[in-house]
Amino acid sequence: LAVSKDLCRKAKLLSDKSNVIYLPNAVDTELFYPPDSLEEKFAIRRKLFNIEEENIVLINTRHLRPVYDHFTLLAGLAYLRKIDPKMYRRTKLVIVGDGPLRKYIELFAYNLNVSKNLVIIGYQPRRLMPMLMRAADIYVNTSLSEGMPLSILEAMATGLPVISTSVGGILDLIKHEENGFLIPPKDYRKLALSIQRLVKGELMHKMGKLNRYKIVGDFSIEQKLNRLIKIYENVQRCI
């Protein structure tokens, strides 16, 4: 079973094509859902991050490891300051996660002079993830490779627009300029420009709504169970 079309294609190059089946990851849409109102979002934001409602909150929930390339996130923040100082002052990047690169990421942020716009809250229990997502405006991802990340599925189910590198199974989820923005790996300039365009173009609500609709329709737990049942039924008929 391959969780993305990219992995499915690669697996078929290595083995009997008939033995590889695409079965994407899924998310609990009753656990991850959009906030009922802006007031709810702002209340969660103040409680969890001590960030005020006028801020634009970018969220990333990946471990602080090389493959997730948090350095490009910070370089994107620095470039946003250059091209749009007013928007930069309103922007906060919240990283939910921990790992061996944390001190290097904090030092990089200090050297770029973006520490005031960065909030690293470290590892958080899974039960808090839905609330953390509901406090954000945009999900940002700069990973260098992927299968099909649950973090992006969770963000989409929460009604967040996504800016992500165009790698792996992310291409199964995000269509560029329709429900998010896709950027090349390590391209901090396009990251900053995508943030600017998403906010100034007032696309956040539209793209977030499309993402919620897409996840409920195609990537819910119910959809995955139905697909899995059909796979087992087909296997049983072949025995």
Image (spheres, grey):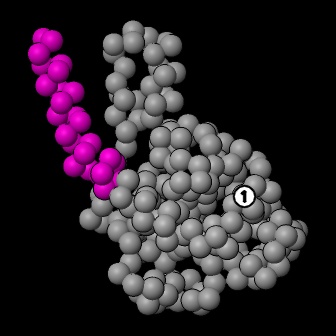
Magenta span includes 79: no
20 left or right of 146 in image: left
Quadrant (top left/top right/bottom left/bottom right) for the C terminus: top left
Residue at image coords 52%, 21%: 10
Q: Tell me if residue 15 comes above or below residue 118 in the rendering.
A: above
Quadrant (top left/top right/bottom left/bottom right) for the N terminus: top left
Residue 44 figure quarter: bottom left
The spot of residue 140 in percent (x, y) is 61, 60
Q: Amino acid at mark 1?
A: Leu
Residue at image coords 47%, 46%: 173
Residue at image coords 44%, 25%: 8
Q: Nearer the viewer, residue 137 or 117?
A: 137
The spot of residue 105 in percent (x, y) is 75, 62
22 left or right of 184 in image: left
Q: How many marks?
A: 1
Label 1, residues with CA under 10 Å away: few <14, some 14-19, many ≥20: many
Q: Nearer the viewer, residue 239 or 80?
A: 80
Magenta span includes 227: yes
In this view of the protein, can residue 127 be seen by the observer? Answer: no
Circle 1 sits in a helix, a strand or a loop, which is it? helix
The residue where tag 1 is placed is 191
Q: Nearer the viewer, residue 38 or 31?
A: 38
113 left or right of 70 in image: right
Main SS class of the magenta portion in the image:
helix
Residue at image coords 67%, 73%: 200
Q: Nearer the viewer, residue 100 or 20?
A: 20
Q: Over which residues does the magenta segment extend?
A: 215-239
The spot of residue 235 in percent (x, y) is 18, 19
The spot of residue 39 in percent (x, y) is 44, 90
153 left or right of 226 in image: right
Residue 73 figure quarter: bottom right
